[in-house]
Image (spheres, helix red, strand yellow):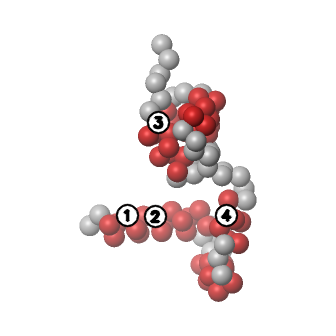
Amino acid sequence: MVKKVNDSDVIALNSVGISLAGIAKRLGCHHTTVASRLSALSVPPADTRRSFMEDIFDGLSLRQQEWLINQLGPSHSVKDFVKSLIIREYISKNP
């Protein structure tokens, strides 16, 4: 029996930047199923290439770029930083 993939789950996971393979793993299907569902819904797959953060960085002003650089370092990666921002925002919205 083939598992039916919920379109809203596919869209939600794609929206947060999960790769096609990652979405498929979470939903118990094949990545081509995910790609097919997104295509049928006219939703472009999330950009999960390594240039993702570069695209974000390039969209910041020079002062914002410098500020971000000063927030990061060998013991605090951009991944850690983004995670902390999400947690902080979640806590502020869900007291």
Q: Which residue is mark 4?
A: 53
Q: Which quadrant would the C terminus be assigned to in this image?
A: bottom left
Asked whether the beta carbons under mark 1 and mark 3 sit within 8 Å of each other, the answer is no
Give the amino acid type for the residue marked by disc 2 in the picture.
Ile
**Front-most of residues 51 and 41:** 41
Query: What separation in Å lies between label 2 and label 1 (alpha carbons)?
Result: 6 Å
Mark 2 residue element: helix
Q: Residue at x 54, y 38 (%)?
A: 41
Give the amino acid type for the residue marked by disc 3 in the picture.
Asp
Q: Which residue is mark 2?
A: 86
Mark 1 residue element: helix
Q: Quadrant of residue 70?
A: bottom right
Please tell me whether residue 54 is drawn above or below residue 65 in the rendered image.
above
Labels 2 and 4: the sequence-earlier one? 4
Labels 1 and 4: the sequence-earlier one? 4
Query: What separation in Å lies between label 3 and label 4 (alpha carbons)?
Result: 27 Å
Q: Which mark is residue 90?
A: 1
Q: Residue at x 46, y 24 (%)?
A: 4
Give the amino acid type for the residue marked by disc 1 in the picture.
Tyr
